Amino acid sequence: MESSIQGVHIKKLNVVSDERGWLMEILRCDDELFQNFGQVYLTTAYPGVVKAWHYHKKQVDNFTCVHGMMKVALYDARADSPTYKGLMELFVGEKNPLLIQVPPGVYHGFKAVGKETAYFVSIPTLPYDYKNPDEYRLPPDSSEIPYDWGLAPGLKHG
C-alpha cells in the first residue's frame, strides 16, 4: 500500500490540556493547508460501520475524528497523477489526532473502529450543493478499488 498520495496532506493536531479540560485546533485560516471555507459539518459512524467510497471534482475535503477512532482509506483515481491507483490507510481519532486534507479526484471513506460511535468533523472548501452535489460514489466493496474494508457478509454498509 502506498504511504502517500500526491495532494493528500496530513497535519498532526495539537491538544492543549489543563485542569479545566482540553482544546484542539483543527484548521486555521493561517494554516499552510487552508484554502477556502465552505461549511463545517459533523457526521457519525456506529462501531464497524463503513461510509465509503466517494470523491469530489471541485471540493477539497479537510476532516478529522474528534471522538472514537476511525480507519480512513484513500484511493487515487486521477489518471494524470504520479500516485495513480495508490492507496493510503490512516487511523485517526482520539489516540491519533490528525487533520486529513483530500484533493479532488481522490476517493475516500472511513470505518469506525472500536466499541463506540466515532464523530467525524469535516471542513470542505465548498458548501454542499443540494441541487447539484459534487459527490461521485462507489459502494464500499467496489471492484474498482483494490481495498478490503473487512465487511461482514450479508450486512449493508455505506
Image (spheres, rainbow, N blue to C red):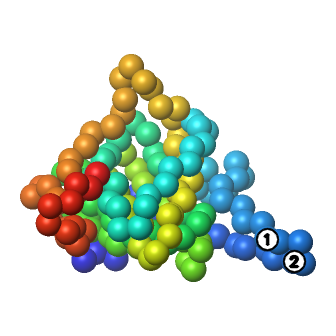
Look at the picture and state if 3 lies above or below 132.
below
Asked if labels 2 and 1 touch by Cβ distance under 8 angstroms, the answer is yes
Residue 136 at x, y percent in the picture: 27, 39
Which residue does the numbered mark 2 point to in the structure image? 18
User: Counting other residues with Cα less than 10 Å from the Cα at mark 1, is it few (<14), some (14-19), or many (20 or more)?
Assistant: few
Report which quarter residue 3 is drawn in.
bottom left
SS class of the residue under badge 1? strand
Q: Amino acid at mark 2?
A: Asp
User: Residue pushed farthest right?
Assistant: 19
Left or right: 128, with 158 as reference point = right
Please state the total of marks drawn on the protein image. Answer: 2
Residue 91 at x, y percent in the picture: 44, 75
Residue 105 seen in this snapshot = no
Which residue does the numbered mark 1 point to in the structure image? 22
Residue, x 21% and y 60% (percent of image)? 155
Disc 1 from disc 2: Cα separation:
6 Å
Report which quarter residue 19 is drawn in.
bottom right
SS class of the residue under badge 2? strand
Residue, x 44% and y 76% (percent of image)? 114
Look at the picture and state if 43 lies above or below 70.
above
Judging depth in this view, the residue of 94 and 105 nearest the camera is 94
